Image: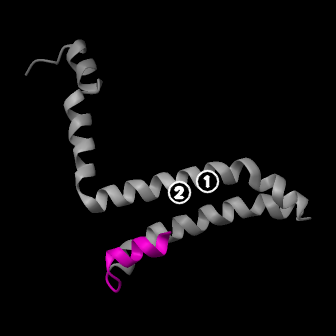
Amino acid sequence: MEAAAPEGKLKALMPRLEDYVMALGLLRVPSVALIVALDAMMHSGNAVQSSFYVAWLTEMGISDAAISLLSPAGDIGAAVFSLTTTYLMRYIDGFWIVLLSL
């Protein structure tokens, strides 16, 4: 068996237009489109929060130490929810889990 040429390996790493077209075609599935739209809303909300949240909390009189614990607490909560999703699907329909995650 011959070794693949270096340019063949590089070509395998390059993105192909067909892959992007197939991925965007998934947006025709209503449930996929809903999740993508909700995800975009969540990310835009997080961007606004990270911009103004700290200043607002400081004005509310919350200490810097408490503010610094809020972000990791949210991340830990998200990680726990992500890791328990498969277990929850035994008892709760996936649709309701998606709504709970919002």
Locate residue 8: give its quadrant. Answer: top left
Q: Position of residue 54 (x, y in %)?
A: 79, 54
Q: Which residues are magenta?
A: 90-102
Secondary structure at badge 1 equals helix
Q: Which residue is mark 1?
A: 46
Q: Position of residue 71 (x, y in %)?
A: 69, 59
Q: Position of residue 98 (x, y in %)?
A: 41, 71
Which residue is at a point 75% across and 56% down the rendered structure image? Answer: 53
Which residue is at a point 23% across and 28% down the rendered structure image? Answer: 17
Q: Residue furthest left?
A: 1
Looking at the picture, does residue 92 appear above or below residue 64?
below
Disc 1 crowd, CA 10 A, few/some/many (<14, 14-19, 20+): few
Q: In this orientation, does residue 68 appear? A: yes
Residue 52 in the figure: left or right of residue 2: right
Q: Nearest the camera: 94 or 72?
A: 94
Circles 2 and 1: CB atoms closer than 8 Å: yes
Looking at the picture, does residue 89 appear above or below residue 49?
below
Q: Which residue is mark 2?
A: 42
* Tag 2: amino acid: Met
Q: Position of residue 44 (x, y in %)?
A: 57, 50
Cα gap from disc 2 to disc 1, whole angstroms: 6 Å
